[in-house]
Image (cartoon, helix red, strand yellow):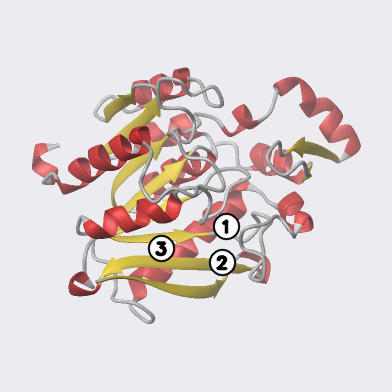
């Protein structure tokens, strides 16, 4: 039987990280996939729960989590109710959160300790996952999903000067109609930690097997990002999903009980990659 367990753990600056783990009761020690969501995303966005179910049905444990400063709350995990936290977020905070989640999955205190950890990141979460994979040998394989190749690709470069002068900018969320604040601390973090937060440089350091997946119809993160990642990681496998958009056919809310075709293709190819013996990659 496929089950889901929920956990709350303290994240950066004391804010809570919500976690859920989907698994087959008969495979409590199965390899663990940790999924990092994207910008203006959360663990239960769109078809993420169906993806978790699908991976659990195919022999994996699937852990999803909310970054501590993603703007959702424990009481409202599907809505951006804490825009103060969202505005205070930085990429270093997200790396700290991801390290905390990996520690949680590895220590065996609340769930069977993960032996093999596979990291999967969507969009911005792909960039975070690339940096963390370069840093952490506990991660055995990496799958990127419509990943960015630079954190500065999340906004137009020309707004940075005004952003610094004002100390804050507002990014529209077209789905909710909210104006999402971003403080200039995000830029300061990028400047102060330039080497660590250089996605392509970190990608070039990765020794673990990697799969780069990108949709051919992604208008949010152009395919050139995947090409840049492949150039930085020549040994990585690359999959182009025909007709796949930035979310591989998923929307929020997603009310169907089957995966959209591009997302199903992503899942099947990712599962095949993760199941390959390392010597054959």
The residue singled out by tag 1 in the image is: 67
Kind of element beneath mark 3 = helix
Q: In which quarter of the image is the N terminus?
A: bottom left
Percent x, y of residue 198? 52, 34
Query: Residue farthest to the front?
Result: 256
- Can the viewer see residue 209 in this picture? no
- Which residue occupies 41% across, 63% down? 102
Whether residues under marks 2 and 3 lie with C-beta atoms below 8 angstroms apart, the answer is no
Question: Picture quarter containing residue 145?
Answer: top left
Q: In this view, does 142 lie above or below 241?
A: below
Q: Dot 2: within a 10 Å radius of its alpha carbon, few (fewer than 14), some, or many (20 or more) residues? A: many
Percent x, y of residue 62? 34, 59
- How far apart marks 3 and 1 lie (CA) works out to 13 Å
Whether residues under marks 2 and 1 lie with C-beta atoms below 8 angstroms apart, the answer is yes
Percent x, y of residue 7? 48, 74
The residue singled out by tag 2 in the image is: 17
Q: Is residue 111 above or below residue 83?
A: below
Q: In this view, does 256 lie to the left or right of 137?
A: right
- Which residue occupies 53% across, 40% down? 251
Q: Residue 102 carries which label?
A: 3
Q: Dot 3: within a 10 Å radius of its alpha carbon, few (fewer than 14), some, or many (20 or more) residues? A: some
């Amino acid at each position: 039987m496929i089950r889901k367990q929920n956990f709350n753990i303290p994240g950066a600056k004391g804010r809570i990280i919500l976690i859920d783990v989907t698994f087959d009761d008969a495979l409590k020690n199965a390899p663990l996939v940790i999924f990092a969501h994207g910008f203006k995303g959360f663990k239960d966005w769109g078809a993420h729960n169906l993806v978790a179910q699908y991976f659990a049905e195919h022999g994996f444990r699937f852990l999803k989590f909310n970054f501590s400063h993603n703007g959702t709350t424990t009481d409202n995990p599907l809505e951006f109710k804490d825009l103060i936290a969202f505005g205070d977020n930085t990429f270093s905070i997200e790396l700290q959160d991801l390290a905390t989640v990996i520690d949680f999955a590895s220590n065996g205190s609340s769930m069977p300790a993960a032996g093999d950890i596979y990291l999967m990141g969507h969009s911005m979460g792909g960039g975070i996952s690339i940096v963390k994979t370069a840093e952490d040998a506990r991660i055995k394989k990496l799958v990127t999903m419509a990943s960015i190749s630079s954190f500065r690709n999340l906004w137009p470069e020309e707004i940075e000067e005004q952003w610094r002068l004002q100390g804050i900018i507002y990014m529209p969320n077209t789905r909710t109609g909210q104006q999402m604040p971003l403080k200039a601390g995000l830029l300061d973090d990028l400047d102060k930690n330039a080497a660590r937060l250089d996605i392509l440089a970190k990608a070039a350091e990765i020794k673990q097997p990697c799969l780069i997946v990108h949709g051919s119809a992604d208008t949010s993160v152009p395919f050139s990002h995947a090409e840049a990642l492949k150039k930085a990681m020549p040994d990585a496998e690359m999959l182009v999903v025909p007709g796949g958009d930035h979310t591989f056919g998923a929307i929020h809310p997603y009310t169907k009980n089957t995966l959209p075709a591009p997302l199903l293709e992503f899942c099947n190819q990712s599962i095949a990659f993760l199941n390959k013996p390392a010597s054959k990659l």
